[in-house]
Image (cartoon, grey):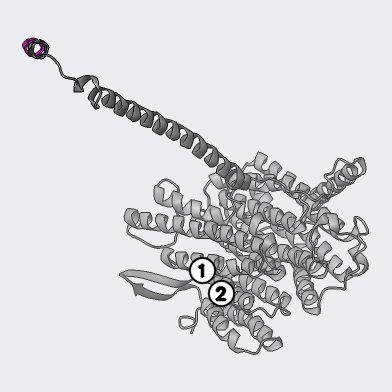
Amino acid sequence: MTDLFPPFLLFVAGALVLPLIPNGHPRSLAAVIVPVISAYFIWMMPEGMHGQFLFMGQELTLLRVDKLSTVFGLVFCLAAFLALIYAWHVRDTIQQTTSLLYAGAAIGAVFAGDLISLFIFWEGTAIASVFLIWARRTEGAYSTGLRYLIVQVGSGVILLAGILLQYVDSGSMAFDAMTLGSPATWAIFLAFGVKCAFPLLHNWMPDAYPAATVTGTVILSAFTTKLAVYALARGFAGTEILIYIGAIMAIFPVFYAVIENDLRRVLTYSLNQQLGFMVVGIGVGTELALNGTVAHAFASILYQALLFMSIGAVLFRTGTAKASELGGLYKTMPLTMIFCVIGAASISSFPLFSGFVSKSLILSASVHEGHYIVWGILLFASAGAFIHSGIKVPFFAFFAQDSGLRPKEAPWNMLLAMGLTAFLCIAIGVYSDPLYALLPYEVVYVSYTTTHVVTQLQLLFFSALAFAMLMRTGIYPPALKSVNLDFDWSYRKLGPALIGAVRYVVRGIWGGLIGTGLRGVNWGFAALQRAHGADGLLARAWPTGQMVLWIAVLLGATLLLNYM
């Protein structure tokens, strides 16, 4: 049965049927049912290779079912279910259908057993997701969507090049563990890195996610980058360079998130930071580290979605997500505030919340393998996450000042989605055994030890103290209307400016050369005119004796040159 109905086909079928269903509650209900049925199929599928067939002489595998693919498939279905409840009120056919196609493509990718199938679904996520940005229907969203699409399709082109090179090298299209050392594997690694938002390749994310619709940002936060995490875990587990890439990813977004005014951009930088923890876990590559990566991906999808949901609800009711324009919303949006605080506690790894039981696995794996400096960096990054997402986001949105805004509470469907997500964040933190049971390897680990709990509480306490002191002394960056420059400035502003300057210089040099050449030609024509014109020197009548003399001179010179 699963061979006939792979889970991604349910999403495709749902997207095709959805426009035929009357708009409103019936269509929203139909959309929500799709991930539920898909999750059931995934849960029931036996491990092994399914859905295999030949295509142009190559054996393709649509369903490679093991614990790694299953846990990502389940959390993707869960994320789609929660996001579609959150978007229940949306009456936009484009958003509804592309949300299903996007989720289906991501689920298809995690079950792909060969590189060709992976590439098809990889590009499917890019094409489907861009409509969640364009659905905002503004000129800025259109331009941002084009930039996003260029990056995502570019990642696919690099992946395709790597696949072709890999086939030339090995004669196989299987999607298995790889080692860096050939142009093929480096190309595939780079393609995964683009979607995972590696440093200097990350700018598409803070550019695109805040530009999407209120509901579109929630959906975008769940799939693209976590698909890249899955691909890295499948293909490059234990690759040491990932440890250092992940450490950089975990640290640099902290500074951007602290100074950013747009709270959805703050959350996007925090998402980039959380990916760093996962990449470190993949680089360490032990069973404990990979379990931590998968657990953290699962938990991150939920608490990041909850934070985006809460700020999205604020944006939906007030029309802004700028910290400088918000504050005091706890008075009229108390439930949204509570859910935001739960998401903030989860991302900050408070004990009894989901982030604590997932992040501690990665930290412990780093220490066990002797990566003490990386462990220290991750601790600093954890403190930074608490400051910019655990404190800043709820503080500036709901408490910092009285903005005078008195919006209504979020719609019932948004509250329901946030409530379910918040419940899962707490449930996983309180009782982590069901999550640990889904992980790829057996978990022999206890999160709630005295050392873990006391260390984390100390870290959070001193981080809160530092935030309070910075606020009291006025050192903490205030919420201001501003534009913060990231690395994309180098190719969006500096690059075009340099190209323009080079073009100006080249044009000036070329123009000078052409002008000099034309003046030389004109001078030559003038000289010829003076010599051969009607009144020119050579046009005059010369005595025959002088002409004979000149001929004799020329002949003598010729003979002399020939002799030499």
Choose top left, top right, bottom left or bottom right for residue 474.
top right
Q: Is residue 447 visible?
A: no
The relative height of residue 535 versus residue 402 in the rendered view (above or below) is above
Instruction: Name the side, left or right, on which 329 lies relative to 366.
Output: right
Residue 101 magenta-highlighted = no
Q: Position of residue 6 (x, y in %)?
A: 50, 78
Who is closer to the viewer here, 551 or 32? 551
Dot 2 crowding, Cα within 10 Å, few <14, some 14–19, many 20+: many
Tell me the magenta residue range. Answer: 555-563
The amino acid marked with disc number 1 is: Gly
Q: Amino acid at mark 2?
A: Leu
Q: Label 1 near label 2: C-beta < 8 Å?
A: yes
Q: Is residue 395 above or below residue 239?
A: below
Residue 394 relative to residue 305: left or right? right
In x, y percent, where is residue 188? 46, 54
For the residues labelled 2 and 1, the Cα–Cα distance comes to: 8 Å
User: Residue 100: horizontal and vertical position, in percent?
Assistant: 59, 76
In primary-sequence order, the first of circles 2 and 1 is 2
Rendered residue at 40%/48% (across/down): 183
Residue 25 numbered tag = none
Residue corresponding to mark 2? 101
Residue shown at 63% from the left, 80% from the top = 93
Q: Residue at x 54, y 44 (%)?
A: 241
Secondary structure at badge 2 equals helix
Quarter residue 301 falls in: bottom right
x then y, percent, for residue 411: 81, 77
Q: Circle 1 is placed at which residue position?
A: 124
In the rendered structure, the answer to whether residue 559 lies left or right of residue 124 reads left
